[in-house]
Amino acid sequence: MTKGMSYFRNFTLSLLIVWALMVFLMGSSSQAAKQQLLFKKYTNLKLGFTTQNFIKSLPVTLENEKTLIDYASDKGFSWIELRDPSAVLTLDECREIADYARRKKIEVGYAIQKGLLDNEFWEIFSRAVKNAAVFEGPKTIRSLGCGPEFFADKNKKGWTVSELNKAIEIANKAAKKAKEFGLQYVAENALEVLKGDGIRYFGITEFFANVNPNVGWQFDTANFFSAARVWTKPKDARTFLEKNIGKMFYIHLKTSRDRKAQPFLSDNELDFDVIFSTMSKHNVSYIAIELVALENVDEMYKNHDRSIEYLKTRGFISVY
């Protein structure tokens, strides 16, 4: 080898080393620059959001879910609730999303948007439970408790006794099926009354008092005040929370004010500190911000920023 060739080879090698070092440092800097949203007082809690917030602006697709995982990672969230209302994602797509989330270090819980008495519940749940099993995170499969039986009658306060018994039967069956896939089934409180009159109608209290112990609860922090057909007193909601915390696996963090769900987080009718302290004490970690969905994706991002700022101002979280 000539002296000139040796010099050229060494020069090229040096350039490659410098380039590799620059790439490494840029990557390290990028990783270091990523913020994290961490709870200050209740350090065992994890903050995330539900993709339902973007359902109007980023409908459920493989690529849109990846986009939201990127957003979660960049913002410093710990996890997302992937809301796939009718389980339209295929199992292969969910596996790809799960792998992508794993690389981004974002946990994922899976949810459908069907009530227990919906005629399509079992068709959708049978797909959903397989999808949910591929994700790493809370290992939950979530649905609504109530459904079309309420949509048809705007004055309906709760389940009839026959509807309640049927809902309990289906919930028990869903929980058993979920366990077969290594999952926890959870049902959300929504339109039904907190507690029925014991004769004409029944509510979420009677539901959870009679389902099997393996049926879990997904608590929506606003629904008792903004969705339930009978407004719930905050003290009664707190009593229900404290009594049923052992059944709860995660929450939708949502604000109700003047009996209406709000576009971003602010003070709620049941104070968030009461909820967070109860969750922390019982080691229920997962919190998903839920906001009123808008068609403008930029407005949704802004409402998430406003919500994060509110949680910072209240002293709940810090941004690192």
Image (cartoon, helix red, strand yellow):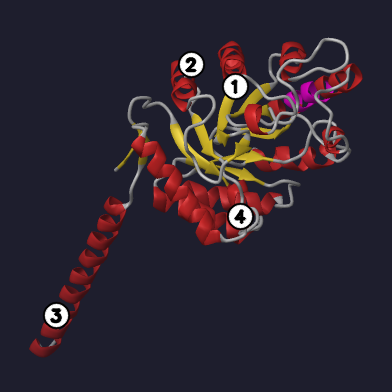
Pointers 3 and 1 in contact (C-beta within 8 Å)? no
Query: What is the C-alpha distance between the residues marked 4 and 2?
Result: 34 Å
Query: Which span of residues is magenta-colored?
Result: 169-176
Q: CA distance from mark 4 to mark 1?
A: 28 Å
Residue at x 78%, y 34% (from the top left corner): 115
Whichever of labels 4 and 1 marks the residue nearer the N terminus, that label is 1
> Gap between marks 2 and 3, in whole Å?
62 Å
Label 4 vs 3, first from the N-terminus = 3
Q: State yes or no: discs 1 and 2 in contact (Cβ < 8 Å).
A: yes
Query: Of the residues tagged 4 and 1, which is closer to the observer?
Result: 4
Count every numbered label the image shows and give the total. Answer: 4
Residue picked out by circle 2: 282
For the residues labelled 4 and 3, the Cα–Cα distance comes to 56 Å
Q: In percent of the image, x 65 and y 56: which residue is there? A: 56
Question: Given contact means CB atoms under 8 Å apart, are the residues at marks 4 and 2 in contact?
Answer: no
Q: Tag on residue 294?
A: 4
Quadrant of residue 16 in the image?
bottom left
Tell which residue pokes out farthest to the left in this image. 3
For marks 2 and 3 on the same chain, the one whose residue lies earlier in the sequence: 3
Q: Which mark is residue 11?
A: 3
Residue 239 appears in the figure: yes
Q: Is residue 105 visible?
A: no
**Residue type, numbered disc 1:** Met
Q: What is the quadrant of residue 188 in the picture?
A: top right
What x and y, as percent, mark residue 214?
69, 18
Q: CA distance from mark 1 to mark 2?
A: 10 Å
Mark 1 and mark 2 lie on one chain; the one further toward the N terminus is 1
Q: Is residue 119 magenta?
A: no
Q: Position of residue 109 (x, y in %)?
A: 59, 38
Q: Using the image, tell me which numbered label, if any, was put on residue 248.
A: 1
Mark with earlier residue (4, 2): 2
